[in-house]
Amino acid sequence: MVRVKRGRVRAQKRKRFLKLTKGYRWGRKNKIKLAKTAILKAGQHAFRGRKEKKRNFRRLWQIQINAAVRPFGLSYSKFIDKLKKTKIELNRKMLADLANNEPRVLAKIIEKIK
């Protein structure tokens, strides 16, 4: 049977793992066994975080829209309902941006749906 030497391959694999754990604390940055689990856990948190980010931004936009339409005697839910009934298709991100940067444009939209 042929002898397999994998010192270089093994070292490169360890190096790759430890490069990913740069900046971690204690043994998680330089002990391969701890580094592997730390990388897996970090990947799970990152995946979940990307989903939570979308949720958080949507909540923020809803709050901003609600605050902008209150002076016109509307609540967020009634405003969105009237937008759908008048077939104005603007997403919440754009509406929140209008509420913050262009309140006159938002006022015109509200006048149109009333």
Image (spheres, rainbow, N blue to C red):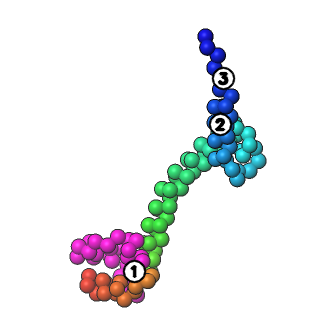
Q: CA distance from mark 3 to mark 2?
A: 13 Å
Tell me how many marks there are.
Answer: 3
Mark 1 neighbour class, 10 Å CA radius: few under 14, some 14 to 19, many 20 or more: some
The image quadrant that residue 36 belongs to is top right
Q: Main secondary structure of the magenta part?
A: helix
Residue drawn 53% across and 56% down? Answer: 49
Label 2 close to label 1 by CB (< 8 Å) = no
Return the residue at label 1: 98
Sequence order check: which comes first, mark 2 or mark 1?
2
Left or right of 20: which side holds 76? left
Query: Label 1 sits on what residue type?
Result: Leu
Secondary element at tag 2: helix
Secondary element at tag 3: loop
Sequence order check: which comes first, mark 1 or mark 3?
3
Mark 1 against mark 3, which lies toward the viewer? 3
Residue drawn 67% across and 31% down? Answer: 8
**Residue 102: x, y in percent?**
40, 85
Nearer to us in this view, 99 or 22? 22
